[in-house]
Image (cartoon, grey):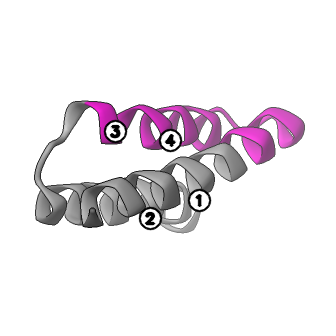
């Protein structure tokens, strides 16, 4: 049950990133959004899903801030 809810949460965050990336023409946000939407289909473990989701969701901020 927790994996399903995490999948819905990460999918909605991914959709937000994808829409933002497309409208603002930021390819890193678009790619991270697509990866976040696909991630629940690939990862089965809830703990791995949380860790990977946090890392991918933080990637656009880290890239904009430090690169």
Q: Name which quarter of the figure residue 26 lies in.
A: top right
Examine the rendering and report whether any part of residue 67 can be seen.
Answer: no
Which tag is nearer the camera, tag 4 or tag 1?
4
The numbered mark, 4 or 3, whose residue comes first in the sequence reads 4
Q: Are marks 4 and 3 in contact (CB under 8 Å)?
A: no
Q: Distance between the residues labelled 2 and 3?
A: 15 Å
- Which label sits in the foreground, 2 or 3? 3
Which range is magenta?
18-41
Say if the magenta span includes residue 31.
Answer: yes
Instruction: Give the mark nearest the N terminus, 2 or 1.
Output: 2
Was residue 27 drawn as part of the magenta stretch in this picture? yes
Q: Which of the two labelled residues, at mark 2 and mark 4, occupies the earlier sequence position?
A: 4
Residue topped by disc 1: 64
Q: In this view, does 5 lie to the left or right of 26?
A: left
Label 4, on which residue? 32
Residue, disc 3 = 39
* Residue 28 image point, x, y percent: 57, 39
- Nearest the camera: 41 or 55? 41
**Magenta: main secondary structure:** helix
> What distance separates the C-alpha of mark 2 from that of mark 4?
9 Å
Give the Cα separation between the discs numbered 1 and 3. Answer: 22 Å
What separation in Å lies between label 4 and label 3 (alpha carbons)?
10 Å
Circle 4 crowding by C-alpha within 10 Å: few under 14, some 14–19, many from 20: many
User: Where's residue 7, x and y in %?
Assistant: 40, 51
Residue 58, numbered label: 2
Looking at the rendering, in which quadrant would you find the N terminus? bottom left
The reply to whether residue 64 is visible in this rendering is: yes
């Amino acid at each position: 049950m927790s994996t399903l809810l995490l999948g819905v949460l990460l999918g909605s965050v991914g959709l937000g990133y994808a829409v933002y990336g497309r409208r603002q023409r930021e390819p890193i946000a678009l790619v991270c959004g697509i990866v976040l939407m696909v991630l629940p289909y690939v990862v089965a473990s809830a703990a791995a899903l949380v860790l990977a989701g946090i890392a991918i969701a933080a990637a656009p901020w880290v890239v904009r801030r430090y690169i």
